[in-house]
Structures are given as C-alpha cells and as structure tokens.
Amino acid sequence: MGTTLESTDEQMRELLERLHEEYPDTTISLRFSNRLELLIAVVLSAQCTDERVNTVTAGLFEKYETAEDYASASQDELAEDISSITYYNSKAGYIRDACSQIIDEHDGEVPDSMSALTDLPGVGRKTANVVLQHGHDVVEGIVVDTHVQRLTRRLGITDQHRPEAIEQELMTVVPEGEWVQFTHLLISHGRAVCSARNPTCSACVLEDICPSSKLDSQVDLDSGESWDSGSGA
Ligand code: SF4
C-alpha cells in the first residue's frame, strides 16, 4: 500500500529515518585523494558508472598528478587514456580546458566557489556541488544525479523534471544538515532496490509511503508511464 504521508515534510522525515537505518555508512563511491582528482573523477562519471571511473582513474591518477599534466597532454593521448569511459573524447577536451583555466585563473588550485567552478568547461552545478562538498567541505546545495532525480519523483517529493529545479525544491524540504547525506542515501537505495528499469518494490523499506509502488500503483511517477509499458513489472 503506497501512499505519501500528509505533508512533504513528514514524508521527508520518514524517508530519511528509514534510509539512514538501511544505509548507515553510505558516502561517495568515487575514489580520489585530492581536489583535482575529485574534479576529474566527477567529470568522468557523467553518464558512466562510478565503478568504471574508479578502474580508469586508478591508472590515470598515477600518470597525471597536476593540472599542468592534464593541460599539456595532447587531446589524443588523454582521450586514449580514458577511452573506456563514455564520451571520452568530449571529456578529454573538457578536462584539458578546465585544467588550463585552473592554471590561468586559480594558480593551479581547484576553486572553492560555485561560480568559479561552474565557469570551468564541462562543470555544471551537480559536479560543482560534489567538489564543494567533498573537496572543500562547503555545502551550498544538494547533488541531484540520475538516482536522486528518479527517486524523488517516484516518491512524490517533486514533480519537477530538470535537476536544477529539483535541487531548488529539495533545498526547501531536506533539512540543511542532511543535504550531503540525502544524495548518498538515495543513490544507495537507487542502486540496491529502486533501479530505473525494474525496482524491487516488494523488498523496499519505503514501499508503504511510495505512491509509485508497483504493488499498489499502475504508474511510475518518474516516467509518468504505466509500469507495464516498459519500466518493468
Ligand atoms: S522500489 Fe518501488 S516502492 Fe521503493 S521507492 Fe522505488 S518505486 Fe517506490
């Protein structure tokens, strides 16, 4: 029986409590040992699994250590070094250009403000939020990736589509002290249970408060389509 609680605040409180219990130690799964590595890993992770990124960066971070190393690499060489990553050609270009800008405008250091980060080629608000939170310990917003986008829509927390609009709504309902963990909790739940194609609603700790539950609802509120029509039954 999936029904949202009376208010979004109540729904949020309940969801946080249950997911904290389910995934007590969840955190970022990308591997990095400094801010530049974090930035590179997050840029590489767009539309690619963190697992694949970690495999590639294990060797990449041995070969390239500074912004200068990336900026001075040839496009072909860097693209080849990340060729098992999705959109490797564009990402190689973004990384080289972002590192040149970091050298020219920030003395080779990854900047620590939202505006300076989002000025870098290939860096949007999601990437900037991750770098600020995990590289600089600065929390300015909520990271909205594909899991957060899907789950917040399925759970009836938002009906916005664009990640930026979802983030703005979430910032009004997620308690500020939870802004970082909220993302990791939803990513963990998305990976473990609430997958894009075939969520395991019968094993979900949020089933009774989820208006998209397949046990009770015909419609996936994320896609707006019937579960039978393709999201998997
Ligand atoms: S697994 Fe099913 S019940 Fe759980 S959050 Fe996802 S759609 Fe809702």
Image: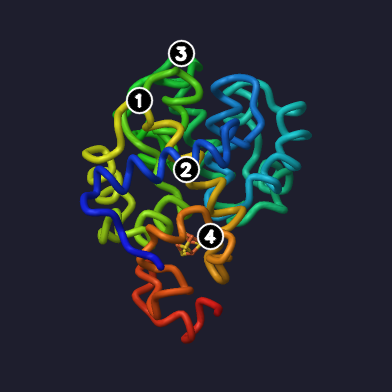
Q: Residues within 10 Å of mark 1 (few under 14, many from 20)?
A: few
According to the image, label 1 marks what residue? Answer: 177
First along the sequence among labels 1 and 4 = 1
Q: Amino acid at mark 4?
A: Cys
Q: Estimate the spatial distance between the alpha carbons at disc 1 and disc 4, rounded to whole Å.
A: 24 Å
According to the image, label 3 marks what residue? Answer: 107
In the image, is residue 110 above or below residue 86?
Answer: above
219, 169: nearer the viewer = 219
Residue 129, image x, y percentages:
40, 33
Q: Residue at x 75, y 42 (%)?
A: 55
In the orientation shown, which residue stands out farthest toward the bottom? 229
Q: Amino acid at mark 1?
A: Gly
Residue 110, image x, y percentages:
47, 21
According to the image, label 4 marks what residue? Answer: 194
Q: Nearer the viewer, mark 1 or mark 3?
A: 1
First along the sequence among labels 1 and 2 = 2
Q: Residue at x 25, y 40 (%)?
A: 173
First along the sequence among labels 4 and 3 = 3
Is the CB–ligand 1 distance for label 4 below 8 Å?
Answer: yes
Q: Estimate the spatial distance between the alpha carbons at disc 4 and disc 2, rounded to whole Å.
A: 14 Å
Q: Residues within 10 Å of mark 2 (few under 14, many from 20)?
A: some
According to the image, label 2 marks what residue? Answer: 18
